[in-house]
Amino acid sequence: MKIYVIRHAETDSNKNGIAGDIEEDINESGVQQCLRAREKIKNLDLDLIISSPAKRTKHVTEIINVNNIPVIYDERLIERKLGIYENFEYKDIDRLDFWNYYPKKYLELESMKSVCNRVSDFIKDVKNRYADKKILIVTHGGVTRGFYCCCYGIPEDGNLADIGQKNCELKEYEI
């Protein structure tokens, strides 16, 4: 089964290097990213879009859904819960440990293991319900790392820092 995964477009927090599951909309640059992504997506012959219910992912879904494909919102696609690290500047965080599957610090937030388990459950459900469909997933940076791990495995060192997706970047997976 083929799925496509797109990370939401740029927000002001992304632009300013702020970490978080902040409930904010995309900015003007993000709207432009969506318009460019829409051109790639319109020819994918999709059957279904499944999106995180966050404001920014809903807005992305509205813009890129040029073919008026049915949309489902799924809580399992929400961003990683950062707890006390909400609104931290990335420059003040040890990025390699923050995004590590086997962290040594940052234990007060949702682990990447938890995110990967959430994504794994989501993928199993999607395969059971929509095995014959081409699906676009609209989600967040942490969750895109979960898709990578579920499809390619966890890197031996657990380092997930550089395998996420850029804003509005589209990736294809065979699941």
Image (tube, rainbow, N blue to C red):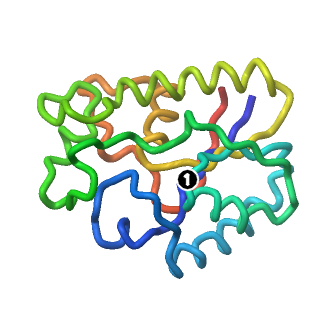
**x 62%, y 50%: residue:** 138
In-front residue for pair 23/113: 23
Query: What is the x, y in percent for residue 69?
Result: 85, 52
Query: What is the x, y in percent for residue 8?
Result: 54, 58
In-front residue for pair 41/84: 84
Secondary structure state at the residue bearing disc 1: loop
Mark 1 crowdedness (10 Å alpha carbons): few <14, some 14-19, many ≥20: many
Answer left or right for 91 relative to 166: left
Is 77 above or below relative to 17? above
**x 35%, y 67%: residue:** 13
Is 112 above or below relative to 142? above
Q: Quadrant of the C terminus?
A: top right
Is 123 above or below relative to 44? above
Q: Quadrant of residue 88?
A: bottom left
Mark 1 lies on residue? 54
Answer left or right for 44 relative to 5: right
Q: Quadrant of the N terminus?
A: top right
